[in-house]
Image (cartoon, helix red, strand yellow):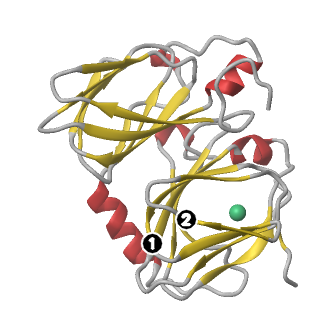
Amino acid sequence: MECPFPATSPLLLARYARIRLGETLVDEPQASGVIHYVIEGAGQTSAASEQIEWNAGDVFVVPGGGSITHTASDSDAVLWVVSNEPHIRFEKLQPPAQESAPTSVVHYRADEIDRQIEQLYHIGQDQETAGTALIFSSDKQQDSRNVLPTLTLAMNSLPGGAMQRPHRHNSVAVSLVIQGEHCYSLIDGERKDWAPWATTITPPVSVHSHHNDGDELAMFLIVQDGGLYYHARAMGFKFVDD
Ligand SMILES: [Fe+2]
């Protein structure tokens, strides 16, 4: 992409962070907010004068523009960390102070995420349903249903033997594979097999579908720069199999 700064897609940066027991990991992102998923372990994070205690499977979002301090509790911990740092750096902007950031510290616990996903399967869906996804938002972003002004965050799920219809959109999708065996995506006709805890990228405008040939429910956490495209009235979502 020839960006003069780290970037996973032009406007998003996804990283894995290992927090060693007994050490402190300090992140000072040039971002307006940072999304975290706890892959392994338990620990604490301090940011914006708040402290949260997290466990495996939790999601938490914290404002950028200051220090974010992570420590692990009983063993090493691993986080998936996604921010809009490339967007801020592209514009040569400074992130807002944590108190005035577009997100507060928001913690979504694993048991509540599981409970909400289970409820989704009690609500019917039809052929126009793009997928069965839990959308994350917060008090500061509830009007847009985004997690940050330009970012959307969703836990997507796909039952065993199911597929998500081929479609396209103008936002990129950067996803973390959380569970699922014998799963793959078709991206512009090319098969991409999933691997445990891999970060997958669906490029903007590509035609893609997701497939679960296994027996268990597949889960993947998706960050998109969708807020940007919704705001610009340019998401360009379309099913392409009809
Ligand atoms: Fe998609």
The N terminus sits in image quarter:
top right
Instruction: Give the residue at x 82% y 53%.
Output: 235
CA–CA distance in space, label 1 to label 2: 8 Å
Check contact, mark 1 vs mark 2: CB within 8 A.
yes
Q: Callout 1: 10 Å neighbours few (<14), some, many (20+)?
A: many
Mark 1 or mark 2: whose residue is earlier in sequence: 1
User: x, y (%) of residue 187?
Assistant: 76, 65
Whether 6 is drawn above or below 179: the answer is above
In the picture, the quarter occupied by the C terminus is: bottom right
Q: Position of residue 212 (x, y in %)?
A: 55, 80
Residue denoted by label 1: 180
| Residue located 17% across and 29% down the image | 21
Mark in the foreground, 1 or 2: 2
The residue positioned 50% from the left and 22% from the top of the image is: 64
Quick one: 189 or 231, which is closer to the camera?
189
Q: Specify the quarter for ligand 1.
A: bottom right
Q: Which residue lies furthest to the left in this view?
A: 74
* Mark 2, residue position: 194
User: For the residue marked with disc 1, what is the amino acid?
Assistant: Gly
